[in-house]
Amino acid sequence: MKFTSTHEWVKKEGNLSAVGITEYAAGELGDIVFVQLPEVGDNVVAGEAFAEVESVKAVESVLSPVTGIVKAINEEIIDSPELINEDAYSAWFVKVQVEQEGELISQQEYLDLIK
Amino acid sequence: MEIYFAFGRNTNPYINLATEWDKVQNNAKNSICLFLWQNQNTVVIGANQNPYRELNLDAIKENGTSIARRRTGGGAVYHDLGNLNFSFIADKSLYDAKKQLSVVQMALKTFGLKAEISGRNDITLNGRKFSGNAYYKDKNNCLHHGTLLINTDFNTMKNYLSPRESKLKKYGVSSVKSRVINLADIAKNVTPKDIAFSLKTAFEQVYGQKSKELDINTNDNIIALAEAWQNDNYIFGKWKDFDAKIEQSFEWGTVEIDLNLANDTIEEIFISSDSLYPKSIEKAKELLTGKKSNDINFLATNDTVMMDIINLVRSKICLN
């Protein structure tokens, strides 16, 4: 699993990559009440917003760690956004066929960043 | 750091929301803006709210009141000219909700009002809410905006923001009801204009400099956004496929129907009725559950009660 400095994670699963937000981000947002996802077939661009999460605090855009095409979206988090607060690393947002990675950092680098 | 201020005089909700968003999209580096604005009678819903679920649409439509959807989260609010809206638009590095709220607190102090921050999103006076706040953060810029109830018509507010009870699972973000208060009830005769001037002074004081004038002239981006945002498709679009609430009287009794449409299929349907034909009601429910809206066109039965219900559902969900 790799990370971005803007609190997203990306994990290779076969020929696709799952993308989500980090536990730290979910904690900072507070209780998440709504998630807006792109559609299957949409293009995502590294460093650009591809989703929005609404928490009791704010609406925030989620930036894509990679450039590519959305191959799957997680309908479960649409129905139950609280899953992201419960386990941010299982609650993937989208699975992307990656064309190019953005600026990714290692787990250790990420942990240092949020220290 | 640069600070910018404007008090908009346009009361069109779509233009105002579009102007605010244009400033978020185009905020200069290292600058913070305070934009004040007022809407003529308008219900404003949160970014992810279901208007069918949160509002009394019949009353709103009957009075020709506008409905607008904002980009920030949270619940539904009512704006009239007794309400003043403030928007702080800040470069991410300058964004500080507490500091921004201190501007509001300082401005109100001028009128002897001791405002308290309550929870995350409310500003209260004696425990009663007069300001709801909401936030948006994107890559570079942040928006923090809120209402200030000064002399708003609470009867209308209450009427518009009271939806009919529904039995369906909640989808979308719910509004939270609060006890509200108008500032003019405490600081007699205070007007939105008075508070606007006081906010400007407090803004300059908190940020330690004179403000420059924020350009709020209507540009092409604002016009395009306002046009898109007053479209029913933006306000209701993604929701119309999720819910319908139907109420109708027939010779045999009155029915109330709640149904949930997903992917054009009736996923859930509740029918309550005072009729003497509970079996027909139950059968109609079974028949309609899991049907695609197109398939309803082909349903037929000799049972009058069932047929009336089927026709009613068809008229509502095949309309759009």
Image: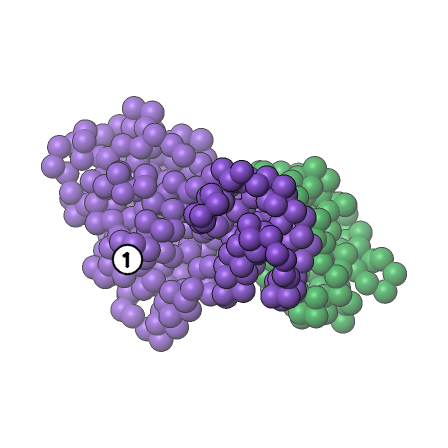
Chain colours: A green, B purple
Tag 1: amino acid? Gly
Residue B295 placement (x, y as % from top left): 65, 64
Where disc 1 sits, the SS reads loop
Residue B97, visible in the rendered structure: no
Q: Position of residue B168 (x, y in %)?
A: 57, 42
Q: Position of residue B314 (x, y in %)?
A: 55, 61
Q: Is residue B284 left or right of residue B219?
A: right
What residue do we see at 41% from left, 34% from top? B177
- Along the horizontal axis of the image, is B230 left or right of B153? right
Outermost residue toward the right in this view:
A14
Q: Which residue is mark 1?
A: B64
Q: Residues within 10 Å of mark 1 (few under 14, many from 20)?
A: few
Q: Position of residue B170 (x, y in %)?
A: 56, 43
Q: Is residue B303 visible?
A: yes
Q: Is residue A6 above or below residue B253?
A: below
> What is the quadrant of the N terminus of chain B in the image?
bottom left
Q: Residue at x 81, y 63 (%)?
A: A16
Drawn side of residue B84 relative to residue B72, left or right: left
